[in-house]
Amino acid sequence: MTDAAELTQITRTLTLCRHFHASGRRCGSPALRGEQFCYYHHPNRRPGPLAERRAILRAINRVFQPLLNRSLPLDRADRLLERIRAASDSLPR
């Protein structure tokens, strides 16, 4: 079997990840053996610290925007930010 034919045979047997990006484009990575998703998009995968830090920053932004627009009471914002700080403190440094 030629290298090209062998590569074609391998790619035919690969199952692609079933994740779709927000743009509607499908993930092109191969799925894990016996699974429907690749390593990155597998539901059992825990996000790394960088992804968690980004989530913390998004949460802070979601508190500050209504606070600046005066649509979120200060005491409620304080409680939310305290919880976000606690989550941030639990991240590895």
Image (cartoon, rainbow, N blue to C red):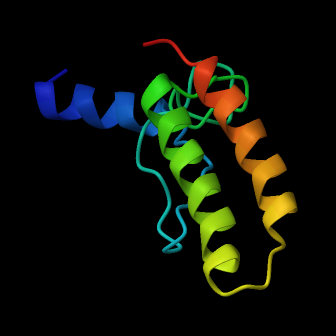
Residue found at the very far front of the displayed protein: 75
Residue 44, compared with residue 85, is above or below; it is above
Residue positioned 62% across, 35% down in the render: 37
Please state if 90 lies on the left or on the right of 12 as rendered: right
Q: Is residue 11 left or right of residue 57?
A: left
Q: Residue at x 68, y 74 (%)?
A: 67
The residue most toward the left is 3
Residue lying at 29% horizontally and 37% vertically, measured from the top left? 8
User: Along the line of sight, which residue is nearer the eye, 65 or 31?
Assistant: 65
Residue toward you, 30 or 3: 30
Above/below status of 25 relative to 34? below
The residue lying toward the viewer, choosing from 1 and 69, is 69
Image position of 92 with respect to 71: above or below:
above
**Quadrant location of the N terminus in the rendered image:** top left
Q: Quadrant of the C terminus?
A: top left
> Which of the 4 image quadrants contains residue 59?
bottom right
What residue is drawn where x is 84% and y is 72%? 73
Q: Position of residue 26 (x, y in %)?
A: 50, 60
Q: Position of residue 77 (x, y in %)?
A: 77, 60
Residue 49 locus on image (x, y percent): 48, 24
Q: In the displayed structure, would residue 34 be above or below residue 70?
A: above
* Residue 13 locus on image (x, y percent): 49, 31
Tally the numbered discs.
Answer: 0
